[in-house]
Amino acid sequence: MADNLLCSWDSVHDPVHAAYTTTNAAEISPGLTRPLPADIWRACDYLWDRGLVEDLGTQDLVAIPEPPTATTMPFIAGRLVINYGINVAFAGTFAVEEGSDTFKQLVGGGEAVRTGASENQSRNVATRRRMMDRWQQAEVVGNKHRETSTRAYLESRLRDWKAPSDGELVEALDEAIALLGRIFLGHYYATLGGAEFTTAIENLLKEHLPDHPPGWTNTVTSGLTGVESAEPAKAIWDLSRFILARPPLAGEFASLSADDFAARLEAPPGEDWQAFAGEYAAFIDSCGFRGQNEIDPSHRTWDEAPHFVLSIIQANLNAGPDRDPHERERNQAAAREAVEREIESRLPAEALDEYRQALELGQMLNRAREMTKANWVRATRSQRPPVVELGRRLAERGLLDDAEDVWFLRLSELPQAAEGTLDAGEAKANVAARKAEMASLEGHELPVMFDWPVELIPKETAEAVTSATYDGLGISPGAVTGRARVVTSAAAAISAELEPGEILVAPVTDAGWTPLFIPAAGVVVETGGILSHAATVAREFGIPAVAGVRKATELIPDGATVTIDGSTGTVTVEP
């Protein structure tokens, strides 16, 4: 295989930048990615990388190789990873003096990945001014991108995709790729800035208040209210309260199947269902782009598959007012404001201005990070319909055995399919070979952090134990004890039925998982950092959470009694 690739649709190794991590990448895109979504993402990644260096005027300092060569978020062994080598190179163009631990908040475990500063300090200072301007404008730009991505998402849902020609379907996909390439740059600025100023707050507290409680940095950069990734959880809670206010409707929902749910939405049987159908339609317009593996256009989201939403509604129907996410959000905001007042009263006068600026930017950028993540997920959803329709046509013509096989084609093969030059026998053989390749990769995994070359690690199943203590990374403070509800995958999350007070144990969680946080008393995940999307939402709702407990879904028995401490990062399993 070329360049010693571990998978035929991997990114080609870039010898200049070769430091990778699965952390955070595994959060947003867990497991293996099929060939076409990998190619689509690679094209988007290249576009925003180019946009970044052009925007900052640093093309001569950080060369962006063309696909399929690895850029910021490449694929290795068929899995999305983060190339923190190139991210450090980006940050090095605006680092001043000794650089900073910019990526400390993003890399799992909170490790410091130091960004060095170049010898040309005057140029770095000028680039940092441009970067500071982008950080200060992040919320404004994010709101513009929200309008653009929302319009693209809604238009893609309403468009009659049977009308365009094959060529027009490919053009529509190209336009959707270009849209994501533009929008993702706003997310990168917000992400980098949020990490930068969160770290700056932490360093100021260490310097001037060395005896401060360890959770203060997290507290003052959380409880921000209105965080985008927390909105789905609140919206589903509101649906459950709408239902509870109508006892006959609530009685139906208690044992409603997904098929019956969809049928009643399609043809509401009575006034209650008609009213609910209107509420649900508004919910889908605003949150339907969410789901498990939501950045992968080959996966269905809530607008197509209501199973997850139904299961969370049913769980929320059994939850008391103490689980109300609106109230929990208000409580966290009050806790943040109390800590802010204490810090202000204790910091020396000479440090106040620097702290206030870091706090204002840190809070704004961490909120903007979640909004901009939602923006690019919406943009991703406009990539799906043209591919689905093209797959349907190719299967109908006998070029593919099944419409879903379109996701095993390569991006370069789609124009051939549209032009009628794709050979059916060759296409089917390639699909079969790629499926076999993907199946063989399922039994292996990558290290959390690694350089190139890397060897795959055979997956070994850990044996569940009834009594043990594990050390992870505390990502949301508080201690709680409850029964473990182990959810082993994104697919399993769709039908998970969490009971109020249970501890959610999952390999990863992203924004599409976070409605599970409302019935959950606590969360344990195998990967993720302080600024992971799951950590952010857990802190917004005051739910204790621990990340970085490797193989937690195997080690912790489903139904076991678990105590987690989101401050210390400890997870204790009791007999």
Image (cartoon, rainbow, N blue to C red):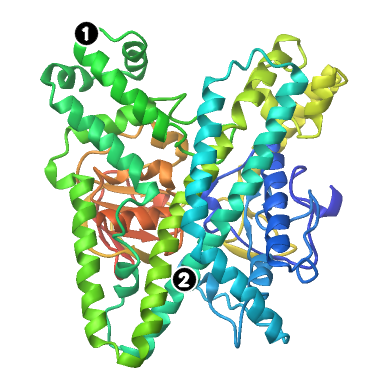
Taking the spot 64% from the left edge, 13% from the top edge, the residue there is 162
Horizontal placement of 229 versus 414: left or right? Answer: left
**Residue 209 or 112: which is nearer the viewer?**
209
Q: Is residue 314 above or below residue 268?
A: below
Residue drawn at (42%, 68%) of the image: 362
Q: Which numbered tag is attached to residue 540?
A: none
Q: Amino acid at mark 2?
A: Gly
Quadrant showing the C terminus = bottom left
Mark 1 and mark 2: span between their CA atoms?
53 Å
Q: Is residue 458 visible?
A: no
Give x and y (percent) for residue 81. 62, 55
Q: Amino acid at mark 1?
A: Gly
Q: Nearer the viewer, mark 1 or mark 2?
A: 1
Mark 2 = which residue? 110
Report x, y in % for residue 133: 55, 68
| Left or right of 151, for residue 179 | right
Q: Going from the N terminus, do you reach mark 1 or mark 2 first?
A: 2
* Crowd rating for badge 2 (residues with CA inside 10 Å; few <14, some 14–19, many 20+): some
Left or right of 573 on screen, residue 47: right
User: In x, y percent, where is residue 90?
Assistant: 67, 69
**Residue that carries the numbered disc 1 in the rendered image:** 270
Task: Pick whichever, 357 or 508, lies toward us.
Answer: 357
Q: Are marks 1 and 2 in contact (CB under 8 Å)?
A: no
Q: Quadrant of residue 131?
A: bottom right
Q: In this figure, what is the number of numbered marks?
A: 2
Q: Alpha-carbon neighbours of circle 1 within 10 Å: few (<14), some, or many (≥20)?
A: few
92 or 39: nearer the viewer: 92
Residue 174 coordinates in the image, percent (x, y): 72, 34
